[in-house]
Amino acid sequence: MLDERDIRAMLMVQGSEREELFTQARAARAGVYGDRVVVRAVIEVTNLCRVDCDFCPMRRSNTRTNDVFHQTPAEMIETAIGVHALGVDVICFQGGEVPQTTTSVGAALPTIAELYGGRVELLLNLGNKTRAEYARLREQGATSYIIKHETSDVDLHLRMRHEALDRRLACTADLLDLGYRVGSGMIIGLPGQSPDSIARDIVLCRDMGVHMMSAAPFVPAPDTPLAGVPAGDVELTLNVLAAMRLAQPEWTIPSVSAMRASVEGGQRRGFDAGANVIVFNATPADVRDKYLIYGKDRKVSDYEYVMDVIAQADLTPGGSVFLTETGRP
Ligand code: SF4
């Protein structure tokens, strides 16, 4: 089993050694998932957030200047009908961290599960909640949950998010205990982050037993305290993806849209480094423009775009890897 030192070494390799690392990562992916890429739709449900992360334009400090939206359950269901028509069976409901999403998303889930006859992965990315809220959402039909720790460096986490890492990890433990398939993730290139800390991120998540992992290069966004900080290194992020694949071959690992925001063609290169998930944005255009994840100029990946990236990577579109014979993970 790879340890922290092995992983750190992988983060540093270059040239032909790096190509070899990527080849091994692709082989590990093929061993578990063949040539199938999980295609996931994301619905952005609200840009309201009670947290004040230094890297995010939807931070609490910007609430007054942002054009706030919160989709209704009926609006979410309408979007899900469109996703179902495309034959996509993973829907991610993503939004800022506010308690109201427990009610709004929770109300939409049973109808959407019914639309699919139960054969759908209903994935949430709605931040810290109480155990009782997570349990309620699971009862409503949620199957999986992304709760990224962003960085496992306790001081850096507090500095960047103004929140305690422990609370985030306690939420992760609750979700695992309630039977969710859980995803974590990290940002690469936060100011003050070290390769040792990135290696620890990967080992921590393997030790926690999460099922999904992600790594996104830091993208400096306007109207945030980190607006003037250089972007995260996409090349390092690719090494991180390969190291994650080799550390835990069963992880589902996306090639995220932030790769595209940083470098043209970056998202396809994520697949060369061992990723096996891609996400397209199904949010209605009028509200999507208010979801300022990387500022107003973000490039939005639609269904056609992700199909094109999968074809360029010489892979095949596929569905949820968590659905069981009976449907619900
Ligand atoms: S990154 Fe998430 S938790 Fe942090 S401010 Fe943005 S929406 Fe809120």
Image (cartoon, rainbow, N blue to C red):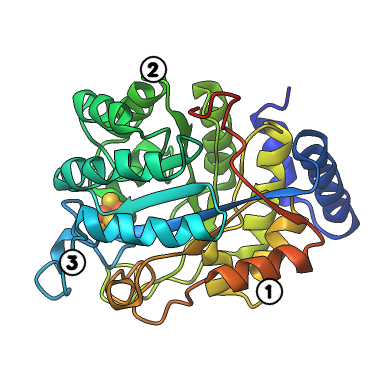
Tell whether circle 1 marks a residue whose Cβ is less than 8 angstroms from ligand 1.
Answer: no
Foreground of the two, 241 or 144: 144
State how far apart marks 2 and 3 are (Cα).
Answer: 32 Å
Q: Secondary structure at mark 1?
A: loop
The dot on residue 265 is: 1
Residue 235 locus on image (x, y percent)? 68, 63
Q: Is residue 189 visible?
A: no
Residue 170 locus on image (x, y percent)? 31, 25
Tell whether circle 2 marks a residue whose Cβ is less than 8 angstroms from ligand 1.
Answer: no
Q: Earlier in the sequence, mark 1 or mark 2?
A: 2
Q: Earlier in the sequence, mark 2 or mark 3?
A: 3
Residue 326 locus on image (x, y percent)? 54, 24
Q: Which residue is mark 2?
A: 177
Q: Residue at x 73, y 41 (%)?
A: 9
Q: Quadrant of residue 67?
A: bottom left
Q: Nearer the viewer, mark 1 or mark 2?
A: 2
Q: Which residue is mark 3?
A: 69
User: Which residue type does callout 1 highlight?
Assistant: Gly
Residue 52 locus on image (x, y percent)? 21, 55
Q: Residue at x 40, y 82 (%)?
A: 297
Foreground of the two, 116 or 46: 116
Is 278 on the left-hand or right-hand side of 152? Answer: right
User: Which residue type does callout 3 highlight?
Assistant: Phe
Q: Is residue 1 above or below residue 104?
A: above
The dot on residue 113 is: none
Q: Quadrant of residue 229?
A: bottom left
User: Which residue type does callout 2 highlight?
Assistant: Asp
* Mark 3 crowdedness (10 Å alpha carbons): few <14, some 14-19, many ≥20: some
User: Quick check: which quadrant has ligand 1?
Assistant: bottom left
Q: Is residue 24 above or below residue 311?
A: above
Foreground of the two, 73 or 150: 73
